[in-house]
């Protein structure tokens, strides 16, 4: 048991999928895992462990934002021995060619600030994905015909953004989408020697103001979970 995770030793698998929403963690566990058991309910941040094609998998909610994600990623790796962490979440498209329901595999994550910023002082650390996971996820998505994009994303540290000028800069530099957790996940994993990847489903569009209807989200998010599981055990 750690401070924020109530699982007992051995209850968390080496491979962990991390949605922000704890209820999405429950949905993914019930949908994709065999014999899923709830192993964490501390602060309502649900976590489940089961098997997928014979492989042990934990699906643990991370909460919203890099500060929350950082807590769970640190404890999963340091206290429970997790070796592969894959974020499965939603994102807002920032480019015209990225459409609602598309999947983005994040090669790098640009950010203004993360909870790890104090470690680097004057250095601008570049948070990047594990290449093996990234390559396997892209292969899995292409095999299923999933519309996907690979490239840089923006991890924002605030949801209610009032910086349209910043969004314009990101768009000019080819940033595919915006979310709130990946940069810190990549940084923590690099520091602690784990593999990390973020796979994101586009749920809304900053340019067209489209949004994915609630009833359609489950199918689209399912494709993302399948890609993550296939990548983890490729």
Image (cartoon, rainbow, N blue to C red):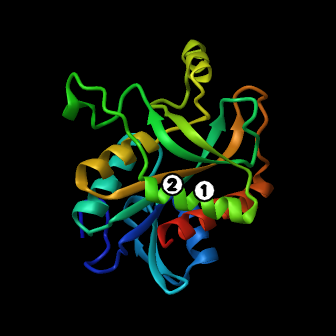
Relative height, residue 42 to residue 203 (above, below):
below
Q: How many marks?
A: 2
Q: Residue placed at 27% from the left, 59% from the top?
A: 75
Relative height, residue 122 to residue 5 (above, below):
above
Quadrant in the picture for the N terminus: bottom left
Identify residue for label 1.
138
Return the x and y of residue 149 as percentages of the image width and height.
65, 44
Q: Is residue 23 visible?
A: no
Q: Residue placed at 64% from the left, 37% from the top?
A: 92
Q: Quadrant of residue 167?
A: top right
Return the x and y of residue 32 as percentages of the image width and height.
61, 76
Residue found farthest to the top: 165
Return the x and y of residue 28 as percentages of the image width and height.
59, 69
SS at badge 1: helix
Q: Is residue 186 left or right of residue 120?
A: right
Return the x and y of residue 133 as percentages of the image width and height.
47, 59
Q: Is residue 70 left or right of residue 50?
A: left
Disc 2 from disc 1: Cα separation: 6 Å
SS at badge 2: helix
Relative height, residue 26 to residue 111 (above, below):
below
Disc 2: CA contacts within 10 A as few (<14), some (14-19) or many (>=20): many
Identify residue for label 2.
134
Q: Quadrant of residue 165?
A: top right
Q: Is residue 38 left or right of residue 212?
A: left
Q: Which mark is residue 122?
A: none
Q: Are marks 2 and 1 in contact (CB under 8 Å)?
A: yes
Q: Is residue 105 visible?
A: yes
Q: Residue placed at 33% from the left, 47% from the top?
A: 70
- The residue nearer to you, when weighing 61 against 98, is 98
Q: Is residue 222 left or right of residue 232?
A: right
Disc 1: CA contacts within 10 A as few (<14), some (14-19) or many (>=20): many
């Amino acid at each position: 048991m750690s401070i924020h995770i109530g699982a007992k030793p051995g209850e968390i698998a080496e491979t962990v999928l991390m949605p922000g929403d704890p209820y999405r963690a429950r949905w993914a566990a019930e949908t994709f895992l065999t014999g899923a058991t709830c192993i964490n309910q501390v602060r309502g941040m649900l976590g489940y462990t089961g098997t997928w094609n014979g492989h042990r998998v934990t699906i643990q909610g991370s909460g919203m934002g890099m500060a929350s994600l950082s807590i769970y990623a640190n404890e999963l790796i340091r206290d429970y021995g997790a070796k592969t962490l894959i974020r499965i979440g939603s994102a807002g498209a920032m480019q015209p060619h990225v459409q609602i329901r598309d999947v983005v595999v994040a090669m790098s994550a640009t950010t203004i600030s993360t909870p790890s910023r104090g470690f680097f002082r004057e250095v601008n650390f570049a948070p990047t994905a594990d290449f093996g996971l990234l390559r396997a996820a892209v292969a899995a998505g292409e095999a299923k015909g999933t519309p996907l994009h690979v490239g840089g994303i923006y991890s924002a540290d605030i949801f209610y953004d009032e910086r349209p000028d910043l969004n314009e800069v990101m768009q000019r530099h080819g940033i595919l989408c915006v979310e709130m957790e990946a940069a810190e996940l990549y940084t923590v994993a690099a520091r602690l020697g784990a593999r990390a990847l973020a796979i994101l489903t586009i749920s809304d569009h900053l340019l067209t103001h489209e949004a994915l209807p609630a009833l359609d989200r489950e199918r689209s998010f399912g494709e993302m979970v399948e890609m993550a599981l296939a990548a983890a055990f490729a």
